[in-house]
Image: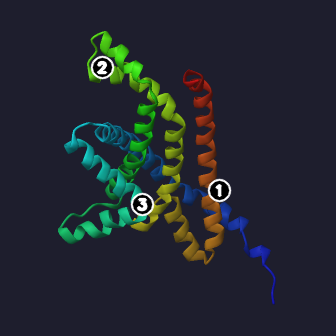
Amino acid sequence: MGGIQWNNLFDFQLAKSSAWFVLQGLKYTIIITLITIVIGLVIGLIAALMRMSSTKILRYPARVYISIIRGTPLLVQLFILYFGLPVIGINLSPFLAAIIGLSLNVGGYSAETFRGALLAIPKGQWEAAYSINMTYGQALRRIVMPQALRVALPSLANTLLSLVKDTSLLSMITVPEMLYQAKIIGGREFDYLTMYILVAIFYWIVCTILAWVQDRLEDRYGKFTK
């Protein structure tokens, strides 16, 4: 019985010659991440406010939306958008399907983060704002939301890290991000393992940088939540 062929575990020469080609997909990872995190957080904040509303017509749709997003796999959601919608005549490009799918997914998860952060703000903050004749919108924007964002910062940063890694799923709907590029070379060279390890290293580097930025932000703003 043969042992592990360590020489075949990682081909450094292949990784070196393929690195630049794989990194061509990084621009898609960055662009899609930036667009979807902005859209997703806006959706999440709106869904959180609807979820907290005393009006049923606002609260129930938000609860259904959050439940569907959190209760179904992201890959299935992407497949429905890209492969399923054409059945009813809606054809989305891979890029647009990626933006819509990831934005809705981020919105569903960040909604609960925002809701928890808003509920963590003492009611006295609202009462103080109302006592100086602020409207609901003014109190939310000027008093409550700045405090809630500091509370939500760690969870939102983790959402961003997850989003970066989730972009690897976009290879399944033919978005030419890093994993998609690696699969092309892996198939051509019959060495998927090397290419997958290379992609993992690139994702690890990107996420490590983002985690470092997260730590700096928490060090800067964390004192305001204590």
User: Where is 180 relative to 163, above or below?
Assistant: below
The residue that disc 3 covers is 74
Tell me if mark 3 has few (under 14), some (14-19) or many (20+) residues whose alpha carbon lies within 10 angstroms of its own. Answer: some
Q: Earlier in the sequence, mark 1 or mark 2?
A: 2
Question: Could you give the CA–CA distance between mark 1 and mark 2, rounded to whole angstroms?
Answer: 45 Å
Seen at 62% across and 67% down, the residue is: 195
Q: Judge left or right: residue 79 versus residue 191.
A: left
User: Where is 23 relative to 75, above or below?
Assistant: above
SS at mark 1 in the image: helix
SS at mark 2 in the image: helix
Q: Position of residue 51 (x, y in %)?
A: 31, 41
Q: Position of residue 223 (x, y in %)?
A: 60, 22
Amino acid bearing label 2: Gln
SS at mark 3 in the image: helix
Q: Which mark is on residue 138?
A: 2
Amino acid bearing label 1: Ile
* Nearer the camera: disc 3 or disc 1: 3
The image quadrant of residue 80 is bottom left
Task: State the residue in front, 84 or 17.
Answer: 84
* Nearer the camera: disc 2 or disc 3: 2
Task: State the residue in front, 17 or 191.
Answer: 191
Task: State the residue in front, 144 or 156.
Answer: 144
Task: State the residue in front, 120 or 65.
Answer: 120
Seen at 54% across and 47% down, the residue is: 161
Q: Judge left or right: residue 184 versus residue 51.
A: right
The residue that disc 1 covers is 201
Quarter of the image for the C terminus: give it. top right
Tell me if mark 2 has few (under 14), some (14-19) or many (20+) residues whose alpha carbon lies within 10 angstroms of its own. Answer: some
